């Protein structure tokens, strides 16, 4: 049987919303906190002299936090989209978070963290750097 054309759309929407909101939220927080911390520890003019570098660190930090938050949703999204049965996002999360015997294995939810980080880091760091420069 052919797969439904919109299989996984809710999982994709959940991943996109979680990734976008967490990335921008963490980025804005780091963009405010890092210059204050840098000036406190390295002198009053450090943040101004290293604005681009601090922005990149804020971008990288935002991507790492967002990827850690979204990795379980991404794993479930893949399970929903390639699955041969119609399962929802919560069922897919449960399936990813259990081992072959059915025992809980929450660590498996983050198995895709590395590839997700590799996918998101270059794009999102560049996007946030441009966003910060345009403000």
Image (cartoon, rainbow, N blue to C red):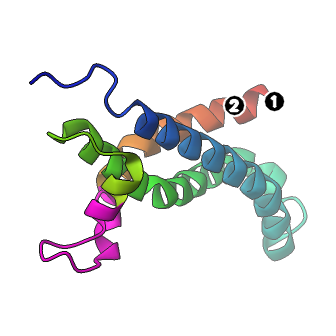
Q: Which of 13/101 is in front?
A: 101
Q: Is residue 101 magenta?
A: yes
Relative side of 65 to 116, left or right = right
Q: Residue at x 56, y 46 (%)?
A: 18
Q: Is residue 17 magenta?
A: no
As helix, strand or loop, the secondary structure at mark 1 comes to loop
Marks 2,1: beta carbons within 8 A? yes
Q: Is residue 69 above or below residue 86?
A: below
x, y percentage for residue 110? 35, 64
Relative side of 122 to 131, left or right = left
Q: Residue at x 68, y 44 (%)?
A: 24
Q: Residue at x 71, y 50 (%)?
A: 25
Q: Which of 12/129 is in front?
A: 12
Q: Which residue is mark 1?
A: 135
The quadrant of the rendering that contains the C terminus is top right
Q: Which residue is mark 2?
A: 131
The answer to whether one can see residue 130 in this image is yes
Q: Residue at x 41, y 54 (%)?
A: 90
As helix, strand or loop, the secondary structure at mark 2 comes to helix
Relative side of 125 to 118, left or right = right
x, y percentage for residue 68? 47, 61
> For residue 29, which numbered disc appears in the image?
none
**Cα–Cα gap, marks 2 and 1:** 6 Å
Residue interval drawn in magenta:
94-114
Quadrant of residue 106 within the rendered picture: bottom left
Q: Residue furthest bottom?
A: 103
Q: Which of 105/102 is in front?
A: 102
The quadrant of the rendering that contains the N terminus is top left
Quadrant of residue 95 within the rendered picture: bottom left
């Amino acid at each position: 049987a052919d797969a439904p054309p919109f299989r996984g759309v809710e999982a994709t929407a959940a991943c996109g919303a979680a990734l976008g909101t967490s990335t921008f939220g963490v980025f804005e927080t780091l963009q405010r906190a890092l210059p204050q911390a840098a000036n406190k520890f390295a002198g009053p003019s450090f943040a101004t002299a290293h604005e681009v570098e601090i922005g990149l660190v804020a971008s990288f930090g935002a991507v790492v936090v967002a990827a850690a938050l979204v990795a379980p949703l991404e794993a479930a999204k893949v399970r929903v989209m390639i699955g041969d049965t119609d399962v929802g996002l919560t069922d897919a999360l449960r399936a990813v978070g259990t081992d072959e015997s059915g025992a809980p294995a929450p660590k498996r939810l983050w198995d895709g963290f590395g590839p997700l980080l590799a996918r998101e880091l270059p794009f999102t760091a560049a996007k946030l750097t441009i966003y910060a420069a345009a403000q």
